[in-house]
Amino acid sequence: MSENVIHIILQKLRSTPQGDIIDGNDLKKIKTSQEEIFETTLCHLNVLRISAPNPPYSNEEIEVVMEKVNECIQEYTKEKKSEMIEMIEIIESTKMMLLLIDINKQKTLRIVESLIEKIIKGTAKNEFPVKYEMVKKIIEDLLTECPEESREIVKSIIRPFNENDAPFLEEKKITQYLKKSKMEKEVIEEMFEGMMGESNKNFKNGFWSLIEEAKEINEEDEAMSEDEELEDRKKKEDIKMFIRVLGKIVSYYPKWIEGDENYLERILLIPMEEERIQVVKIVVEYLKKGVIEKTKKNELIGCLLERRKDKSVSIRSIVGKYMMERGGKNEESEEDGIEISDLIIEKMNDIEESIRRETIEEIYKQRFEEGKEIGKKIIKEIKERMKDRKETVRAIAQTFCGEYIREYIEQKSGSNKDFSSQMINEMIENMENIKNEEDNIRIYQIISQNILGNITLTMVNSKSKLKETIKERAERLIKLFGLLDEENFKKMMKKEGVNETEKKELGKKLEEYENSREEGRIKEVVVNILSKMYPMPTIETSKKYAREMLEGMSGKFGRMLRDMEEDETSFSEYWKKAKRIDGEVEIKKKGKIEEFVNGILEKIRNKIVQKEMIKYLIKTHEEEMKEYMEIISKYCKEVNYGNIMRIIKMYEDDIEKKVNVMKEGYLYIEKEEKNEEMKEEIKAYLKMKEYTISKGCMKLLHLLWNDQEEGYYDMLFEENIKNVLKKKGKKAMNGLLIVTKIIKYKKEYNRKKEITEINERIKSEIIPGMIIEKEPPEHIIIVMKYIVKYLQSKGKIVESDNDESEEKEMMKFIKDFIIHKTDNDTIEFRKNEEEVRGYLIGVVLKLVEMRKYDSLINQREFYSICEEISKKETFCGEYLEILNKCLKQLPLRYFIIPTILSKNNKAIRMSKIVLLRSILIRREIYKKNIKDMTQEKTCIVLPEYCVQHLIHFLGYGEMVENGEYDEISRMLTFMIESLVEGNNEGIPIIQNEINLIKLSNDNLNNNLGITEINQERLNEKIHGVALIGGMVIDEVSRGKKYSPNQTVGTISKMLFELREKNESINSILPYGYHLPKRANAIMTVGEKKKKKENQDIEKEVKQVKEQKEKKPRAKKQKKEVKEIKTVKEKF
């Protein structure tokens, strides 16, 4: 049919009013074709308009018309603008959708969906002629007249908005999306602005009813049929669509939700995590944008805050940020009456590292960028976060505290002195306790640059500007000193002294490197120093950048650095070098390498203490500096140059401090100043018997006196001996300390008869007296120092076992005191005795470095001392400090002591460091002398041979008797892992050691003084420990970690392996351990019965193996077999 015919019929139908008769011939002529789809569809719509409510079409024909309407909407072009508008007008004016929805709901709603979709896209492109206001009536009629279908209608309406999230949920703000969001905003505003009455009520009912889908979803339900899975998937898709559209409503027209906040509270509990995250974001956005009644807002905030403990990290983070944005004041908010500070503190204690970090970052932003007031409770918690277990959290907390202290020093309002003092003291303590190099570097940078002020290149370029900056830093420094406790002030100065030494060492090594560029060892030393000065995330990264920096350095860099750090360098010279040193490093790459180099250069420029700063402070703040200069001159030696006499004069009224300053600055005192007057002053000080002499005073004496003036030592010795032998308390201890110093500097005094009298008094009166009456720790330490210095001064090799020398007697007294306890029933006596015993063990560890004293301790005594060491938890740190200095050169049996000390959880890390350090040094010694190593020397030097000593110690003690197999395995694991760390070559040696112990019945115990009967039992215990050691080394050699739970199997293995050796196997079992009846029978039966039982066991094992090897048969096969058997029987 031609287009003209359709056009004529359409014109005719247009002019026909509703209810008139339609020509049947015209109906027959209307046919659908793709070329005339708009015209023919309009014809059908006009027919439906005219004939309503009794259309001349069947339901199937009407469904075809619906499909064509939808097709027209989808295939609309600009040429069909008038036809498209006419279609919508017919549908709207005749309420045709109400007729169509009864015939086919899905196709009707598809028309609604297509219209809204085309309106959104067409509005964006300014193409589709139909605006929402034209279809608004159609939608509202459907909602009003079909309330039972409101849910499906709402789905069709909102589905076109489901392509993307609301703007505040989108991570990427692309231009195309922003244009579309603008058009969606217009449609949503128009949709809800005039919606009222039943249509609005039914829309809300349909929209919020989608929440009910969430209740029926079970995230953990795994056993579902295909139909159930499909249904579940549809529900999840509907919920996702609902959340996306809800986000857009909140973003564009939050007013529509007012009064329905209870629904938001319900959807906060949605089980799906990703969707719950989106809902939390939506609720936060609504709280910001919506005009909410106060009670409902408080209820909604309460529900939101419950999500702060959600299992999702993202949700906890979002809720935390919202709380932070609302403010961090330490008071109730007038807006909703909820205490914010407690909730913020809760976020700073969250289990997730990122939440703790982000919370502090937000507080930092509010406090220092936006100028908001932060409550004391929150600041106090940030201070605690400097001890956080995670480095990133500690970093931001330390930065916050540094900025807070800086504000206090600059006298800005809002910073509190008490908090500032607590912060800086905890920072310094953390440098000691955390033992993290990055923390140490960062804290030093915070103090030297953030708090005191960074010396930039701009300042360095001008001499006058640099001098002025140093003065400003000096004023800040004196205020900083006022915040520090005495102990932490010492720690900070000690750290500053280490940094100065480090920089001097770097300059020296750089010069060596420049002179011998080919020497790889020197290069690695320089690389190590540089990498420690400014560590990056990993030590390897630091070393990589250090090598790159080294390649870019000129030959002058090392010399200039050394000159800058020289004590004698004047300010003018320092300024010239500081100005030029940056230009002596050429960096080819930018980014992290540049950060690394700048970090090194800033550390060189910025010091906590500088000569010029101290010089200025001594002139301007002399009274205040009196409190600090003694410590500063001790650790920061360079400040003494040119200032020493001025510093000495500061302490005219305090002779003790004056002497200490003279000792520390002795090298800086001009020769003409070292006169008789100075000597006489020190002599007078030494005669003040009421005071304990300092170590520095004796050293200064030794430096000032010449050999010709030894007569004074005689006088000093005689005066103090009287106090030691006749007096008690402080005077006696002061005298003993001076005698100790004299022995140190003049060893010949240890042969005087008075020393013998002192020794006897120590053994018979002083140490026993310390048990009866508690002495101050400093007095005990003085006695111990005397014993050490005296015995060290007598440290020759013992000539024979019959040698009854004084030192041997003293050593015997110390051993007996440690090993054999007195019969004291009083708790106070026992407590005092344990304290003295703990100090004496430290004396032994210091003395055994000398072969003479190690040879005086036999194996049994050594094990007994080790047993006592394991009980002295309070002395762990002191023992490890001693071993850190001398373990590398002690006999291998002493290598077990760090392992014993690792029983104390606080000492595990330090024990590992001490042991590893000594192992590495001993291995280096072995490698350097490998050509001269015999088997005997190898067993003495190579650290792997210390395992046998640990096994014997564990067998000798009571751990096996007490059934402490877990602890035995832990200690063996600790030592073996330390030995094989980075060196698998030692594994065969350790395995061989353990196997030899298993085969031996002697086990190095000939010198233990044990009877033959006990020897056999001891051997059994040692064999048992060796079995555990064998399992540990087997696991470690495979790269696995030995689990203490495996010791249960080890005990069983131990019993069966030792059964043939000893019928009374119960002798090796711990107290209270009983064998199972079956095992007990095996242990006691005769040979024949034993053999038969073994055969039965083998038979059972064989049967079990055969059953395992058989493949399991399917149930179906079993049924078939049964059926075949039944048929055969019948046949």
Image: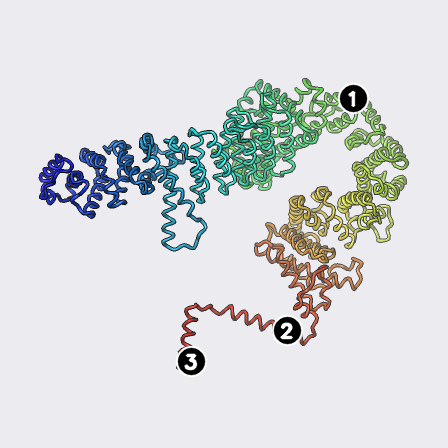
Crowding at label 3, few (<14), some or many (≥20) Cα neighbours within 10 Å? few
Residue carrying label 1: 653
Question: What amino acid does circle 3 point to?
Answer: Glu
Residue 1059 placement: quadrant: bottom right
Tell me which colouring the rendered structure shows.
rainbow
Which image quarter holds the C terminus?
bottom left
Q: Is residue 961 in view from this perspective?
A: yes
Which numbered mark, 2 or 1, is in the foreground of this view? 2
- The residue located at (84%, 47%) in the rendering is 824
Residue 320 numbered mark, or none: none
Q: Secondary structure at mark 2?
A: helix
Q: Is residue 14 left or right of residue 377?
A: left
Residue 189 placement: quadrant: top left
- The residue located at (9%, 40%) in the rendering is 5
The residues bearing labels 2 and 1 have C-alpha atoms spaced at a distance of 92 Å
Q: Is residue 703 left or right of residue 439?
A: right
Crowding at label 1, few (<14), some or many (≥20) Cα neighbours within 10 Å? few
Q: How many marks?
A: 3
Question: What amino acid does circle 1 point to?
Answer: Asp
Residue carrying label 2: 1093
Q: Earlier in the sequence, mark 1 or mark 3?
A: 1
- The residue located at (45%, 31%) in the rendering is 287
Crowding at label 2, few (<14), some or many (≥20) Cα neighbours within 10 Å? some
Across and down, in percent, residue 618 comes to 69, 20
* Residue 42 sits above or below residue 936 on the image: above
Question: What amino acid does circle 2 point to?
Answer: Glu
Q: Secondary structure at mark 1?
A: loop
Across and down, in percent, residue 632 comes to 69, 27
Residue 1129 numbered mark, or none: 3
